[in-house]
Amino acid sequence: MKRKRIRLGVLVLTTTIVLNVGVVADASAATPFGTSRWREPRVTYVVSGSSHYRSVYAAAIRAWNSTGQFRFVQGSSAHHQVTLTTSNSTTGQFHMLAGITFTTAPRNGYYSQAKVLLLARNLSTYHYTTADQIHVAEHELGHVMGLQHSTARNSVMLANNRYNGISHNDVTAVRKRYHTPVGRHS
Ligand SMILES: [Zn+2]
């Protein structure tokens, strides 16, 4: 069992708090990225969960793949880098989270494995629509690729993102992450 390191999840509060609280910059703020990445802008994945959540992940993958900056490619149970699944946990580290991404500690700056959980019971409790759930999945896939939280009001990487899809600056950040050596961040 590889040692997993928690990256970042999405805070779920109430809709009102999500809409009205938080430091939000103008839409032109760049989306930040960290010092680590995959060796190539391409990873293999496996997805599990209900047919509903598999379709949520599929929509998020289509959205990122269509940007042309990164490819999520279906792998096999024996050979994959990223696991996409769900959890009904609501307590401990999952309290008030919509989604969470774990990555293995990077070796020489490169990720080797990642796991994303969508917190299905929390998403239900807080009445996330399918569109909202896809935005959470897009956010978590952003972390998988190496993006960090943005303060831009229209970024999918807003820390408590529910309503935003992928912005132009989010796509630019992925391109820059994979044209910037490991060890350097934005
Ligand atoms: Zn996050």
Image: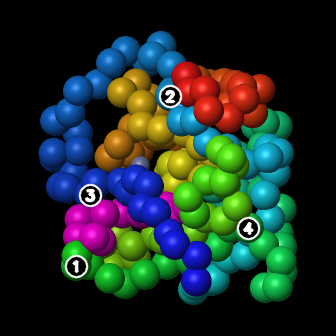
Q: CA distance from mark 2 to mark 3?
A: 21 Å
Q: CA distance from mark 4 to mark 1?
A: 27 Å
| Prevailing SS of the magenta stretch | strand
Residue density around tag 1, few if under 14, some if 14–19, many if 20 or more, within 10 Å: few
Question: Mark 1 — residue?
Answer: 91
Q: Amino acid at mark 1?
A: Thr
Nearer the observer, 109 or 147:
109
In the rendered view, tell whether residue 184 sits above or below residue 96: above
Q: Disc 3 vs disc 4: which is toward the camera?
A: 4
Measured as percent of width and height from the top left, residue 88 is found at 37, 84
Q: Secondary structure at mark 1?
A: loop
Identify the mark nearer the N-term, 4 or 1. 4
Determine whether label 1 and label 2 are within 8 Å by CB: no
Name which quarter of the figure residue 105 lies in.
Answer: bottom right
Q: Is residue 99 left or right of residue 137?
A: left
Q: Disc 4 vs disc 1: which is toward the camera?
A: 4
Question: Mark 2 — residue?
Answer: 32
Stretch in magenta:
93-103
Question: Mark 3 — residue?
Answer: 12
Which residue is situated farthest in the front direction here? Answer: 108
Q: Amino acid at mark 2?
A: Pro
Q: Residue at x 26, y 57 (%)?
A: 12
Nearer the observer, 161 or 77:
77
Residue density around tag 4, few if under 14, some if 14–19, many if 20 or more, within 10 Å: many
Question: Mark 4 — residue?
Answer: 81
Determine whether label 3 and label 1 are within 8 Å by CB: no
Identify the mark nearer the N-term, 2 or 4. 2
Q: Secondary structure at mark 4?
A: loop
Q: Residue at x 67, y 76 (%)?
A: 47
Quarter of the figure that contains the N terminus: bottom right
